[in-house]
Image (spheres, helix red, strand yellow):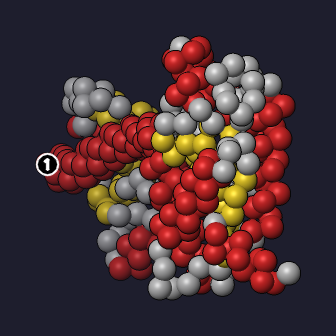
C-alpha cells in the first residue's frame, strides 16, 4: 500500500439517514467510506477490507453492536482494528463496561458532535498510518535482509571455490603444498593425542628432467597429470591425503597407518605407475616412467614436529634414488628397528 491510496473506514448503522449523515461528517479525500446496515453485512466486509477504524452503532436489530464487535475480534483480519461505538444509550458505567468488554476502544454519544468525531477519528488514522509505515519499513528491511543473505550465500560459495582453488594444484588437480602443510600438522596433533601411528611417503619421478628435455614440457606436464591421477587412485581413504610437494615430487600422509601399511600403499603406487607404461627412452633404469619412494612413520610424540617425519621420508627417498631408483626405501632408523624386531 502506498501513501496515496485511500484509507478504508467502516461505518455501521441500521438507519440509512444515519449512515448518510455520518458519511457527510467524515467526507475526506483521503478516506474511503464503506457502509454497512447490519452486523452481518459488517462482518462480511471486514473479510474483504483492511479497515483503519470501525464506527459501529450499538442499537441494531438482529445483531447489536456488542455482538458484532465480539465477532469482529474473533476474525484475524479485524482482530486489532479499533472499534468506536456510536450510541444513544446512557453513558452509565455498566453500558460502557459492556462495550469495552465487547472490544470497543472508545464511545461517541448521539447526537454526534462533528469536532469530537473528527478529533477521535484523526487519532486512530494517525495510529493506522504509523502502523502502515512500520509494516512497510519492516517489509523493506526484510527484503534487504533477504538480499544480504543471498549476497552472503554467494560470497560463501565464492570463498569456498577460492579456498578450493588455493588448496589444489592447478596442473595435477590434487592438493598442493599449502594444503598438505595444513593437513599434516592437523593429523600430527591428532596422532599425538591418540598415540596413533602416522606414515609419510615421499614420491619422486625418476629422471624427470631428462624426460622433459627429451619429450618437451607439454609432455612433462601430461606425465605429472598421469602420476597425480595414479596417486589419487592409490590413496583413497578420506583420512589420508596425497599432494604435489613441488616439481616432480609428491607426498602422501597416511593417518593411523604403520610402516607395513605404508609399504603396501607405496607398492600399489609403484605398480600403478609401471602399468601406465609411459615411454621414457632417456631413463637409465627402464624405458618407461618409474618412481622412487621414501617412507617414514611411527607414533609421533609431543616433543617432535610433523616436519621430522617429512625429513626422514626425504632421506629415505634420497637413499632409494642413490641405490638405483625405481624402488621403495624406509628411513634407515625405521629399517633398523624392523630388523631388530625380526
Q: Where does residue 187 sit, x and y in percent of width and height?
A: 58, 68
Quadrant including the C terminus: bottom right
| 208 horizontally vs 157: left or right | right
Q: Nearer the viewer, residue 317 or 196?
A: 317
Residue drawn 42% across and 33% down? 34
Quadrant including the N terminus: top left
Task: Say whether residue 239 is visible.
Answer: no
Q: Which quarter of the figure has residue 129?
A: top left
Q: Nearer the viewer, residue 60 or 305?
A: 305
Q: Nearer the viewer, residue 31 or 250?
A: 250
Up-down relation of residue 114 to residue 110 (above or below):
above
| 96 horizontally vs 47: left or right | left
Residue drawn 44% across and 57% down? 80
Q: Where does residue 237 sit, x and y in percent of width and height?
A: 76, 55
Q: Residues within 10 Å of mark 1 (few under 14, many from 20)?
A: few
| 261 horizontally vs 322: left or right | right
Q: Where does residue 332 sit, x and y in percent of width and height?
A: 64, 69
Q: Where does residue 297 sit, x and y in percent of width and height?
A: 66, 70
Task: Say whether residue 312 is visible.
Answer: yes
Residue drawn 55% across and 57% down? 314
| 223 horizontally vs 91: left or right | right
Up-down relation of residue 190 to residue 54 (above or below):
below
User: Of helix, strand and loop, which one carries label 1?
Assistant: helix
Residue under numbered circle 1: 115
Q: How many marks?
A: 1
Q: Which quarter of the figure has residue 32?
A: top left
Amino acid at each position: 500500500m502506498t501513501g496515496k491510496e485511500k484509507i478504508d473506514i467502516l461505518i455501521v448503522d441500521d438507519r440509512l439517514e444515519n449512515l448518510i449523515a455520518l458519511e457527510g461528517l467524515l467526507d475526506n479525500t483521503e478516506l474511503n467510506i464503506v457502509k454497512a446496515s447490519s452486523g452481518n453485512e459488517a462482518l462480511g466486509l471486514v473479510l474483504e477490507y483492511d479497515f483503519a477504524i470501525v464506527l459501529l452503532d450499538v442499537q441494531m436489530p438482529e445483531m447489536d453492536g456488542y455482538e458484532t464487535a465480539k465477532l469482529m475480534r474473533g476474525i484475524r483480519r479485524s482482530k486489532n482494528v479499533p472499534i468506536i461505538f456510536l450510541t444513544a444509550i446512557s453513558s452509565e458505567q455498566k453500558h460502557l463496561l459492556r462495550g469495552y468488554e465487547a472490544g470497543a476502544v472508545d464511545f461517541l454519544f448521539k447526537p454526534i458532535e462533528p469536532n469530537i468525531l473528527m478529533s477521535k477519528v484523526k487519532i486512530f488514522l494517525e495510529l493506522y498510518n504509523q502502523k502502515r509505515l512500520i509494516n512497510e519499513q519492516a517489509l523493506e528491511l526484510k527484503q534487504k535482509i533477504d538480499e544480504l543473505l543471498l549476497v552472503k550465500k554467494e560470497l560463501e560459495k565464492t570463498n569456498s571455490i577460492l579456498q578450493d582453488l588455493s588448496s589444489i594444484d592447478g596442473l595435477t588437480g590434487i592438493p598442493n603444498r599449502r594444503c598438505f602443510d595444513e593437513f599434516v600438522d592437523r593429523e600430527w596433533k591428532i596422532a599425538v593425542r591418540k598415540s596413533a601411528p602416522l606414515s609419510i611417503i615421499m614420491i619422486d619421478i625418476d629422471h624427470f628432467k631428462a624426460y622433459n628435455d627429451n619429450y618437451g614440457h607439454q609432455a612433462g606436464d601430461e606425465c605429472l597429470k598421469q602420476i597425480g591421477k595414479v596417486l589419487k587412485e592409490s590413496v583413497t581413504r578420506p583420512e589420508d591425503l596425497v599432494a604435489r610437494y613441488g616439481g616432480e615430487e609428491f607426498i602422501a600422509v597416511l593417518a593411523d597407518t604403520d610402516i607395513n601399511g605404508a609399504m603396501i600403499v607405496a607398492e600399489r603406487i609403484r605398480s600403478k605407475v609401471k602399468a601406465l607404461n609411459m615411454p621414457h627412452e632417456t631413463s637409465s633404469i627402464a624405458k618407461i616412467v618409474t618412481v622412487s619412494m621414501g617412507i617414514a612413520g611411527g607414533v609421533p610424540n609431543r616433543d617432535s614436529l610433523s616436519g621430522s617425519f617429512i625429513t626422514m621420508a626425504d632421506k629415505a627417498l634420497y637413499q632409494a634414488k642413490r641405490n638405483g631408483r625405481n624402488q621403495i626405501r624406509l628411513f634407515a632408523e625405521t629399517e633398523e628397528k624392523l630388523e631388530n624386531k625380526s
